[in-house]
C-alpha cells in the first residue's frame, strides 16, 4: 500500500473538488474510455474559453436551467464543454458539435449519493466515511468514484452497475 501524508490529504481533497487536477482528469479518462472517437485535451493543457452560442448552449440551458457560474471551453474537433454549479453540485459537461451531451462529470457531497451506493459502501467498508464523490455519466451508464477515509487509510473506489470495479488504498502517514 502507498503512504499518504496528512498534508497530501489536504491538498488532495482541495484539488479533488476544484476539478483541475490529475484526479479529475482520471475521471475524464474513465468517462472517455467508453466513448469512441472523443479525444480529450492533453494532461496539463487548458482549453480556450469561448462565448456560449449554438446547439450546445441551447441544450445546456434546457437541461440545466438553474446553472450558475458557468464557463464554456473549446475542445478538439469543434466540441465544447461547460463547467458550472447547479443543485449543490460542481459539474463539467462535454458536448459534441451538434450540441449533444457526450458525457458529464459531477462532484458533490456524500449526502447526494443514491441510497444503493451509500448502502454498498456501508456494507463493504464499515468504519470508513465517504470523503468525496464524483459521478460520471455517459452512454455506458453511471460510474461513481469515491474517496473513503478511515482512521489509518484512504481508499479510492470506482463503482459501476452498483458493483465495485476498482479499488486503491493508501496508508496515512503520521506526522
Image (cartoon, rainbow, N blue to C red):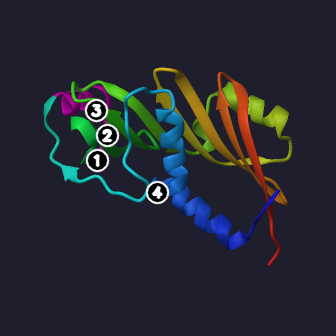
Q: Nearer the viewer, mark 1 or mark 3?
A: 1
Answer left or right for 71 relative to 3.
left
1 and 3 marks in contact (CB < 8 Å) = no
Residue 70 got which mark? 1
Q: Nearer the viewer, mark 2 or mark 4?
A: 4
Q: Which of pointers 1 and 3 lies earlier in the amino acid sequence?
A: 3
Residue 108 got which mark? none
Residue 18 got which mark? 4
Seen at 30% across and 32% down, the residue is: 95
Quarter of the image where one finds residue 102: top left
Q: Could you give the CA–CA distance between mark 2 and mark 4, rounded to whole angstroms?
A: 17 Å
3 and 2 marks in contact (CB < 8 Å) = yes
Q: Could you give the CA–CA distance between mark 3 and mark 2, rounded to whole angstroms?
A: 6 Å
Callout 2 environment at 10 Å: few (<14), some (14 to 19), or many (20+)?
some
Q: Nearer the viewer, mark 4 or mark 3?
A: 4
Residue 170 against residue 112 in the figure, above or below? below
Residue 20 against residue 92 in the figure, above or below? below
Q: Which residue is mark 2?
A: 67
Image x and y of residue 19, in percent: 46, 53
Badge 2 element: loop
Q: Quadrant of the C terminus?
A: bottom right
2 and 1 marks in contact (CB < 8 Å) = yes
Q: Which residue is mark 3?
A: 65
Badge 4 element: helix
Q: Could you give the CA–CA distance between mark 4 and mark 1, rounded to whole angstroms?
A: 14 Å
Callout 4 environment at 10 Å: few (<14), some (14 to 19), or many (20+)?
few
130 falls in the magenta region: no
Q: Which of pointers 4 and 1 lies earlier in the amino acid sequence?
A: 4
Amino acid at each position: 500500500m502507498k503512504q499518504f501524508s496528512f498534508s497530501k490529504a489536504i491538498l488532495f481533497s482541495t484539488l479533488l473538488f476544484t476539478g483541475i487536477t490529475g484526479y479529475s482528469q482520471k475521471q475524464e479518462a474513465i468517462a472517455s474510455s467508453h466513448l469512441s472517437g472523443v479525444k480529450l485535451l492533453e494532461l496539463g493543457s487548458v482549453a480556450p474559453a469561448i462565448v456560449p452560442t449554438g446547439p450546445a448552449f441551447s441544450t445546456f440551458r434546457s437541461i440545466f436551467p438553474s446553472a450558475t457560474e458557468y464557463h464554456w471551453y473549446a475542445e478538439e474537433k469543434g466540441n465544447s464543454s461547460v463547467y458550472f454549479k447547479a443543485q449543490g453540485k460542481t459539474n463539467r459537461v462535454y458536448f459534441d458539435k451538434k450540441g449533444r451531451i457526450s458525457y458529464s462529470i459531477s462532484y458533490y457531497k456524500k449526502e447526494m449519493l443514491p441510497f444503493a451506493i451509500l448502502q454498498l459502501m456501508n456494507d463493504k467498508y464499515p468504519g470508513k466515511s465517504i470523503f468525496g464523490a464524483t459521478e460520471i455519466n455517459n452512454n455506458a451508464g453511471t460510474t461513481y468514484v469515491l474517496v473513503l477515509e478511515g482512521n489509518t487509510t484512504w481508499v479510492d473506489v470506482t463503482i459501476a452497475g452498483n458493483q465495485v470495479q476498482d479499488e486503491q488504498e493508501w496508508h496515512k502517514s503520521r506526522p
